[in-house]
Amino acid sequence: MFKKIFGSSEPKEEKVLPWQSLEEVAQLDVIAEKSMVKPQLLFKHSTRCGISRMVLKQFVSDYNLDLNIDLHFLDLLSYRAVSDAIGTKFEVVHQSPQMLIIKNGVVVAHGSHGAINEMDLEKFI
């Protein structure tokens, strides 16, 4: 009865997504090329921003592991040049947090802040 009211004291196992770390500008050309065959998702995250942390946590919690999409994670504070290059290459204005879906070499959808978790990723597969 107490577990139902107060919850279990056992730690919850956190879901881990198969992120590919985005650390070099050259990776963007590879991502664009891969997007010709399989959609690519870029998640730009600010490690100093509480909103970014909250959005990322919700995204991970809700993400369907069965989706056929590659996941790329950018710590934009550590790799600011990559973040800037994303804006130039894919013609999007920088925001944080921000998620982009790349298909056939172009951005087919992007969102920031709360809009990230409202995106229906399945329609881009």
Image (cartoon, rainbow, N blue to C red):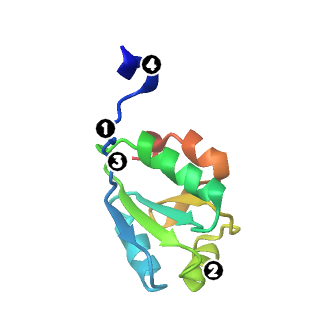
Marker disc for residue 5 = 4
**Is residue 64 depicted above or below 18 in this figure?**
above
Q: Earlier in the sequence, mark 3 or mark 4?
A: 4
Q: Nearer the viewer, mark 3 or mark 2?
A: 3
User: What type is the residue that disc 1 sits on?
Assistant: Glu
How far across and how far down the image is residue 91, in percent?
65, 70
Helix or strand or loop: what does disc 2 sit on?
helix
Which residue is painted at 48% across and 63% down in the image? 42
Name the residue nearer the viewer: 65 or 39: 65
Q: Residues within 10 Å of mark 4 (few under 14, many from 20)?
A: few
Tell whether 71 sits left or right of 120: left
Q: Earlier in the sequence, mark 3 or mark 2?
A: 3
User: What type is the residue that disc 4 sits on?
Assistant: Ile
Helix or strand or loop: what does disc 3 sit on?
loop
Mark 2 and mark 4 residues within 8 Å of each other at the beta carbon: no
Residue labelled with disc 2: 84
Mark 2 and mark 1 residues within 8 Å of each other at the beta carbon: no
User: What type is the residue that disc 3 sits on?
Assistant: Glu
Marker disc for residue 14 = 3
Residues at marks 1 and 4, CA–CA distance in whole angstroms: 14 Å
How far across and how far down the image is residue 53, in percent?
56, 56
Which residue is painted at 40% across and 57% down in the image? 39
Q: Earlier in the sequence, mark 1 or mark 4?
A: 4
Q: Earlier in the sequence, mark 2 or mark 1?
A: 1
Residues at marks 3 and 2, CA–CA distance in whole angstroms: 31 Å
Marker disc for residue 10 = 1
